Image: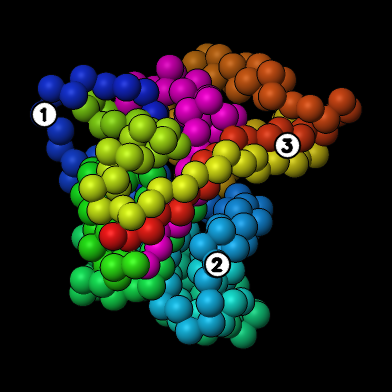
């Protein structure tokens, strides 16, 4: 995962301290409480499990799992699930959710770019809006491929550059300069980039454009929630002086107005994402 400003395209020739970037990312996602936002995305995990056609007894790894949306969905289908993230607090929120439903899930702190599992250990490897934020995209993709067995499946849900969240990151990236040399997370929502990352190891790659709809009491309510709980937005505002914070707030309100289809005072904003199913060669 990464901070919001990482979305902009950067100079690829500049030296990149990926460890430093990852440390900043971890700090961003550890701030606030992503689980407040993450829990609203549960339907995406359910739909991804259906797209993967998961079966009871399948061994499933959730990478950059956050508070465990896909982990829970897979466990509800009687899969053997390992849920991983590099933010311990989010894993704890996942544990709480699993305990409430009496679901058996193994939770493990792990870096998506260095997964602590043997080759071919899982029938399915999944991630929703998680692995796309790793600073070393090639390494993260290679790790997902490595731990997935031949004939197994890799399932992803990634925000597209054109959708609301892709444009959100682009907007706040104009206010806080992104780390130099880091590729945009939104590339994971582009079919061409996914082909670069996975095609050499894939028997097939299927992708479908879907929308997740953000539903809040009002645009101001959305901003309050994201500014308080969503680490990248929280950190972006914290990095700005008051006048610059106001400018960012105005830009975000304008962005919501562009996408909002509620027709009343509430917020009903579709955000496009790409659902991907890769069959491992």
Which residue position holds label 2? Answer: 53
Q: Residue at x 60, y 63 (%)?
A: 50
Q: Position of residue 74 (x, y in %)?
A: 54, 72
Which residue is labeled 3 in the image? 221
Category of crowding for the residue at label 3, using alpha-carbon neighbours closer than 10 angstroms: few (below 14), some (14–19), many (at least 20)? some
CA separation in Å, label 1 and label 3: 40 Å
- C-alpha span from label 1 to label 2: 42 Å
- The residue at the point 68 percent across, 35 percent down is 270
Image coords of residue 17 (percent x, y): 15, 37
User: Can you say whether 101 is above or below 185 in the image?
Assistant: below
Earlier residue among tags 1 and 2 = 1
Q: Which residue is mark 1?
A: 15
Q: Quadrant of the C terminus?
A: bottom left
Label located before the other in sequence (1 or 3): 1
Instruction: State which mark lies toward you, 1 or 3.
Output: 1
The vertical placement of 246 against 129, above or below, is above
Residue 173 in magenta stretch: yes
Position of 53 with respect to 137 (left or right) is: right
Residue farthest along the front direction in this orientation: 203
The mark that comes first in sequence, 2 or 3, is: 2
For residue 9, side relative to residue 269 (left or right): left
Query: Which region is colored magenta?
Result: 152-178
The foreground one among 188 and 18 is 188
């Amino acid at each position: 995962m990464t901070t919001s400003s990482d979305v902009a395209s950067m100079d690829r020739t500049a030296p990149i301290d990926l460890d430093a970037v990852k440390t900043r990312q971890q700090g961003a996602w550890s701030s606030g409480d992503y689980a407040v936002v993450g829990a609203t995305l549960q339907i995406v995990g359910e739909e991804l499990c259906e797209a993967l056609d998961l079966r009871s007894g399948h061994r499933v790894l959730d990478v950059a799992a956050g508070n465990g949306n896909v982990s829970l969905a897979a466990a509800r289908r009687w899969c053997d699930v390992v849920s991983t993230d590099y933010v311990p607090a989010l894993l704890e929120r996942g544990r709480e959710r699993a305990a409430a439903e009496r679901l058996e899930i193994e939770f493990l702190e792990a870096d998506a770019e260095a997964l602590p599992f043997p080759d071919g250990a899982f029938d399915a490897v999944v991630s929703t809006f998680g692995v796309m934020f790793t600073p070393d995209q090639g390494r993260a993709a290679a790790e997902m491929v490595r731990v997935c067995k031949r004939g197994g499946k890799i399932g992803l849900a990634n925000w597209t550059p054109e959708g609301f969240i892709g444009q959100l990151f682009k907007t706040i990236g104009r206010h806080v300069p992104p780390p130099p040399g880091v590729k945009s997370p939104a590339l994971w929502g582009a079919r061409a980039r996914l082909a670069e990352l996975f095609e050499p190891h894939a028997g097939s790659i299927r992708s479908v454009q879907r929308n997740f709809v953000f539903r809040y009491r009002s645009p101001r309510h959305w901003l309050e929630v994201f500014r308080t709980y969503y680490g990248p937005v929280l950190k972006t505002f914290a990095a700005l002086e008051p006048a610059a914070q106001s400018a960012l707030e105005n830009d975000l309100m304008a962005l919501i107005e562009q996408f909002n289809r509620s027709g009343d005072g509430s917020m009903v904003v579709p955000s496009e994402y790409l659902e991907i199913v890769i069959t491992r060669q």
